[in-house]
Amino acid sequence: MNLASHYVPFLKSAPPKAIKTLGLGVVLALVLVGPAAALTVDREQVAQGGYRFEVRCGEPQTHTWTLPAAAQRVEVLEPVPGQAVTDGFGDTRVATVRDVLTRTVADGIAVDVTVVGSDAACDGGGGGAWLTTGVDFRARYHLVSDEPVLVSDDQAGMHARERPSRLTANADAGWRRLRWRSWGGASAAARGAGRNYYTRIQTRFLSAVPREVRRQAKPLGTASCLRARAGG
């Protein structure tokens, strides 16, 4: 006895009008959720350092710190003009910060700090040089850059691409032939095509349907539905 001839169903292709195309002409919208044509990113940076000056009475000494050429909105936090500068032991004033100036140079943004020997450096008339304690330098600035926005259809975010021609939504669906109308803003939009799927499956048994199959496939009658609804 050939059991397969009795119990194995087959799939019958639906007529063309029963084929439903998912995604043809669909507009795909991606929403940007991160710090992303390109996305403008503004990063705040802080530069810091220190320098020991060698000063004499009334004589200016200048040291220059250089920030990146792309630095914008530079704000020097310290030192400030008029600030006292002490000797190496930190207890005697020997100089004063005269000015803090910012200028543009070939390789970046220069910050010039100039101190002038004063107070103890001018006492006694010896004219000798004083080595100061370290003068702290700290400046805040911004780096603004245009960075590419990428999208990945991998759960781990691997193999990210810019303006991809196809994307996978899950294991069974996705889009292809994507043509992007916008990219790089808070959202991106594209037109593309999806995949074709049969929407109905018809099963026909080659012999009488077994009782167990009928029992499992038989829909609930009206009374059964009412009982099920009343019970739960």
Image (spheres, rainbow, N blue to C red):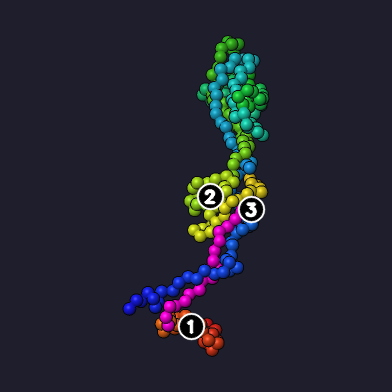
Residue at the (55%, 56%) spot, across then down: 174
Depicted 66 relative to depicted 213: above or below: above
**Which of the two labelled residues, at mark 3 and mark 2, occupies the earlier sequence position?**
2
Residue 89, x across and y down, in percent: 51, 24
Please, which residue is most extreme toward the bottom here? 223
- For the point 59% across and 61% down, the residue is 22
Callout 1: few (<14), some (14-19), or many (20+) C-alpha neighbours within 10 Å? Answer: few
Q: Earlier in the sequence, mark 1 or mark 3?
A: 3
Above or below — where is 176 with respect to 16?
above
Q: In the orientation shown, which residue stands out farthest toward the left?
A: 1
Disc 1 and disc 3: Cα gap in Å?
A: 44 Å
Q: What is the span of residues highlighted in magenta in the rendered image? A: 188-208
Q: Looking at the picture, how far across and down is residue 162, in whole percent?
A: 57, 44
* Residue type at the position of mark 3: Arg
Of the pair 186 and 112, the residue shown nearer to us: 186
Q: Amino acid at mark 2?
A: Ser
Residue nearest the observer in this picture, 197 or 85: 197
Residue 139 point in image, percent of width and height: 61, 32
Classify residue 221 as left or right of residue 113.
Answer: left
Q: In which quadrant of the rendered view does residue 146 lie? A: top right
Mark identifier at residue 152: 2
Q: Are marks 3 and 2 in contact (CB under 8 Å)?
A: no
Residue on which disc 3 sits? 191
Q: Residues within 10 Å of mark 3 (few under 14, many from 20)?
A: some
Image quarter hosting the N terminus: bottom left
Q: Which residue is mark 1?
A: 218
Depth check: give the residue in front, 164 or 141. 164
Asked if residue 213 lies in the magenta stretch, the reply is no
The percent position of residue 153, horizontal first and vertical second, equals 52, 52
- SS class, disc 2: loop
Residue 226: numbered disc: none
Picture layout, residue 209 above or below residue 110 = below
